[in-house]
Amino acid sequence: MTLTKKLWIGIIVLIVLSPLGLILPDHFKAGSAWGEWGREEIQKMTGYFPLGFQKLSELWKAPLPDYAFQGWEGKDLFSMSFAYIISAIVGIAIIAGVAFLIGKVLAKEDE
């Protein structure tokens, strides 16, 4: 088995396991994952929302906020797990595409 094939198998396994980030906190009533807090959660934990965060939060809007599709906020766990998997596939496709393009550009420079 080639190294590339092993890599893609590992990536597929990670894609399938990605809903664990949604299922385990829900199962253990743990709240949000560390570092994935929204504005309201940060304000609740610290008592304020830093001005620098407020300015920077307007710069970028995630293509799939909360790893789900627009309007899916109240869906059941199965639907949200499906959205997590689709989000993982989209993210990996974007990263692989950009890496491929950068590789092509760098390969042309070597010629």
Image (tube, rainbow, N blue to C red):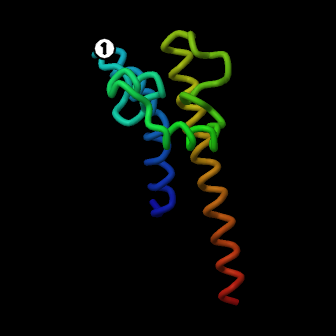
Q: Is residue 107 left or right of residue 16?
A: right
Q: Is residue 106 above or below residue 33?
A: below
At 50% across and 56% down in the image, what residue appears?
Answer: 5
Question: Which image quarter holds the C terminus?
Answer: bottom right
Tag 1 secondary structure: loop
**What amino acid does circle 1 point to?**
Lys
Q: Position of residue 55 (x, y in %)?
A: 57, 41
Can you tell which quarter of the image residue 100 is in? bottom right
Instruction: Tell me if 2 is positioned left or right of 98 in this view.
Output: left
Q: Position of residue 52 (x, y in %)?
A: 49, 43
Decide: is 70 above or below 91.
above
Left of 88 or right of it: where is 18? left
Give the camera-side residue of 25 and 78: 25
| Residue extending farthest bottom | 111
Return the residue nearer the eye: 49 or 40: 49
Instruction: Establish if 16 lies above or below 111.
Output: above
Q: Residue 76: x percent and y percent?
A: 52, 10
Against 15, is 24 above or below?
above
The residue pinned by badge 1 equals 29
Quarter that holds the N terminus = bottom left
Residue drawn at x 48%, y 47% is 11
- In which quarter of the view is residue 107 placed? bottom right
Q: How many marks?
A: 1
Residue in the image at 46% along x and 22% along y: 40
Label 1 crowd (10 A; few <14 / some 14-19 / many >=20):
few
Residue 10 point in image, percent of width and height:
43, 48
